[in-house]
Image: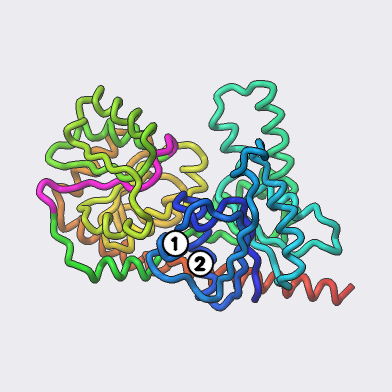
Amino acid sequence: MRLAYLDPHPVPGTATVPLQILQMVDAFGKSGAEVHLITPRPAHPLTPAHILGHPISPQVHFHHLFDPRHHWWFPSGSNQPFFWQASRLLPKLAVDALFVRNIRLAARLLQQPPGRRLPLFFDTHELFANSFREAHYTLSLGQRLKLRRLSQTEALVYQRANGLLCTTPHLLEDIRQTYQTTTPGLASPLGYDAELAANALAESPFQPNRPPVLLFLGSLHAWKGISTLLEAMVMVDGAILKMVGGDALRHQALRQQAQSLGVADKIQWVQAIPPAQRFRMIHTADICLLPLSHRAIASRYTSPLKLFEYMAMGKPIITANLPSMRSLLEDGTHALLAEAEDATSLATAIRTLLDNPDLAHRLATAAQTLAQNYTWEKRAAQILAFITAQLSDTTRTVNAQ
């Protein structure tokens, strides 16, 4: 199969979306697809190997397009120039289908004339209109208009795409209910890089820390439940919390909260680390944490890379008792699930694992076994099978007509 993966983010890059795109196309290539990755040209000299920690599949071909957004004479953040260039490039590549995760780009591609439109499969990680609504307590007139346009864009994509790849079954369910669509869909969680995990495990055996180290690794967005984690540390003694990731501004705000709670001496702050080193960081921790909030992106839609990476490294995990997590983990078997946004429940779960090393070991072992189902390559193979089936159905329908 020949796929074109299009995205207006420059790839490779160290941010979450470019990293996930790079992992996905690498996995597609390793699963037998020929992939043409079309993005703006990155402004930095990083190679895919710098980001992945290993060479990318030779089946992946990069097409870096000119990005006028880096120039003073183009004072706009519009992705329209990228779309124009990509539209001219696509006929030359002779691909079977398009793979997209940017909602506005997908809408533009789906509005092309039927003779020029290629089958498009949309990889969705959230209901964008719902996330926008939850992020604003009150909506100004301009924000209401933006929300209306965003809902219209989502409706177009979810109704016209040839297939939807959703990070959780709850996301697929909400799309169907919200937009009344029957578009074929597949719930396909994200994954972890099996090669990097194996390399980190092989480098050196884990040595328990004294005092134990609790780890949160990832972005520090409010919906991740970080404030609840800091509140929980008031009730946890004899352990250090290592917070890894996020930018300086978010660090400053959370440091102030930690100071006001009186837990600043229990926390170590580490800003973003190179993506290829994240498995080594996880390997050094005693317990890994993924608190989440009740916001829909956390409770129903998230498929966190860090969760799968924690699992792959054989770590005892504490996360939130939410539908998104219950679709992946069983409480007391693979992890402990604390009540979301409940500092007391989270602290109780942490103390339980600190006081019960046998339980921690049992959970970690079960989670590591389960992780084998969630590699990037398994996700890629599942998606390629889905795309192949939908293309075959489309061909049969056209022939029947």
Q: Residue at x 26, y 29 (%)?
A: 258
The amino acid on which the numbered mark 2 sits, given as a three-letter code, is Arg
Above or below — where is 360 with respect to 343? Answer: below
State the residue lying farthest toward the right: 401
Left or right relative to 284: residue 96:
right
Amino acid type, residue under disc 1 in the picture: Gly
Residue 216, magenta (yes or no): yes
Q: Residue 21 at what x, y percent from top left?
A: 53, 59
Q: Residues within 10 Å of mark 2 (few under 14, many from 20)?
A: many
Q: Are marks 2 and 1 in contact (CB under 8 Å)?
A: yes
Disc on res. 379: 2
Tell whether 282 sits left or right of 304. left
Element carrying mark 2: helix
354, 58: nearer the viewer:
58
Residue at disc 1, secondary structure: loop
Residue 238's mark?
Answer: none
Measure how far apart labels 2 and 1 are at the Cα level: 7 Å
Residue 396 visible to the viewer = yes
Q: Position of residue 201 (x, y in %)?
A: 25, 67
Residue position for label 1? 191
Apparent side of residue 123 relative to residue 257 in the rendered image (left or right): right
**In the image, is residue 230 part of the stretch drawn in magenta?**
no
| Quadrant showing the C terminus | bottom right
Say which quadrant the N terminus sits in.
bottom right
Residue sitting at 22 percent across and 44 percent down? Answer: 350
Q: Earlier in the sequence, mark 2 or mark 1?
A: 1
The image position of residue 34, as x and y in percent, is: 60, 75
The location of residue 241, given as percent across then percent down, is 22, 41
Stretch in magenta: 209-223
